[in-house]
C-alpha cells in the first residue's frame, strides 16, 4: 500500500507560507493539508479561499482541504475555484452527506468525509460509492499539537474493514497527533494517508521529518 504524507499548514509560519509549502514539496510530501475552521463547528478560526489560492500558487501538489465548518456546501464553489484538489466535510455537519459529496465531485474535486472521535461510522457504508477519502480524526478537531487518542487505532481498523468490505478504493486518512511514535500503529491498522502538523513544522529539519514518518511505515511490514 502506498504511504501518503500530508503536512498540515496549520502549524506553518503564515508569514512565509509559500516557502513553507515549497519546503514540504521538496521534502517529498504527497499532499498539502489545509485546515479550514469557522469558529462554529470547532472553537477556532483559520482561513478560507484566499489562503487556498495562495497555496495553489506555491505548489503543484494536491491540496486536501479539511473543512471543519457548518454548512460546508456554502464554500464548495469558492474553494474549488481557489484550486482545492479535494474537499473533506464532517459527517456531523452534513445532514445530506450523499448530496454534498456528489456536489464536490461535480465541481471536479475529490470528495472526503470525516468523522470525529466520538462519531461512529453510521451512514458511511451508504455513501461508499461517493467517497474518495475517509478521514478518521485521531484528536477532536480545532487545534494542532494535541495528543493522539489511543482508541483511534481500533477505529482505523474498523474503517479499513468497512472500505474493504464495500470494495472502496477511497484513501483512509488519519489526522491529529500523528508523529514518529503514533504513525506505525495507524499504518498497521490500515491508514494510508497521514496528516502531520506539529510533527513536521516543529521538527529541526521538516524535510527529514516527512521522510522519517514515511520510512517508519515502509519499514513496518
Ligand atoms: C486538527 C486539524 C489537524 C491539525 C493536526 O483540528 O484538523 O489537521 O493540523 O495537527 P497535529 O499534527 O499537530 O496534531
Ligand atoms: Zn485537518
Image (cartoon, rainbow, N blue to C red):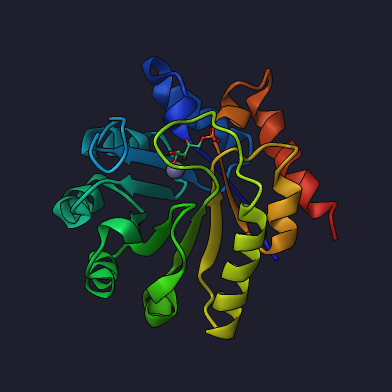
Q: Quadrant of the N terminus?
A: bottom right
- Report the side of 120 relative to 158 (left or right): left
Q: Residue drawn 44% across and 50% down?
A: 62
Quarter location, residue 93: bottom left
Q: Residue drawn 62% across and 76% down?
A: 161
Q: Position of residue 48 (x, y in %)?
A: 24, 37
Quarter location, residue 92: bottom left
Q: Nearer the viewer, residue 177 or 206?
A: 177
- Report the side of 216 relative to 54 (left or right): right
Q: Nearer the viewer, residue 148 or 197?
A: 148
The vertical placement of 175 against 51, above or below, is below
Q: Is residue 179 visible?
A: yes
Q: Nearer the viewer, residue 123 or 87?
A: 123
Q: Quadrant of the C terminus?
A: bottom right
Quarter location, residue 37: top left
Q: Position of residue 46 (x, y in %)?
A: 30, 30
Q: Which quadrant contains ligand 2? A: top left
- Report the side of 37 relative to 9 (left or right): left
Q: Position of residue 155 (x, y in %)?
A: 60, 61
Amino acid at each position: 500500500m502506498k504511504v501518503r504524507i500530508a503536512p498540515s499548514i496549520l502549524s506553518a509560519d503564515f508569514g512565509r507560507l509559500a516557502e513553507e509549502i515549497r519546503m514540504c514539496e521538496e521534502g517529498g510530501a504527497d499532499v498539502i493539508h489545509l485546515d479550514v475552521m469557522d469558529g462554529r463547528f470547532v472553537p477556532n478560526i483559520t482561513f478560507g479561499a484566499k489562503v487556498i489560492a495562495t497555496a495553489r500558487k506555491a505548489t503543484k501538489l494536491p491540496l486536501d482541504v479539511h473543512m471543519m465548518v457548518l454548512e460546508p456546501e456554502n464554500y464548495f464553489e469558492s474553494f474549488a475555484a481557489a484550486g482545492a484538489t479535494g474537499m473533506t466535510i464532517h459527517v456531523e455537519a452534513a445532514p445530506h452527506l450523499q448530496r454534498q459529496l456528489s456536489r464536490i465531485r461535480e465541481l471536479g474535486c475529490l470528495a472526503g468525509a470525516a468523522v470525529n472521535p466520538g462519531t461512529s461510522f453510521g451512514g458511511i457504508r451508504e455513501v461508499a460509492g461517493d467517497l474518495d477519502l475517509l478521514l478518521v480524526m485521531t484528536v477532536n478537531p480545532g487545534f494542532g499539537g494535541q495528543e493522539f487518542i489511543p482508541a483511534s487505532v481500533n477505529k482505523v481498523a474498523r474503517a479499513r474493514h468497512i472500505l474493504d468490505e464495500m470494495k472502496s478504493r477511497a484513501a483512509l486518512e488519519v489526522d491529529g497527533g500523528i508523529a514518529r511514535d503514533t504513525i506505525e500503529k495507524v499504518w498497521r491498522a490500515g491508514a494510508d494517508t497521514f496528516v502531520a502538523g506539529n510533527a513536521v513544522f516543529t521538527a529541526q529539519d521538516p524535510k527529514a521529518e516527512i521522510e522519517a514518518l514515511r520510512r517508519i511505515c515502509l519499514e513496518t511490514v
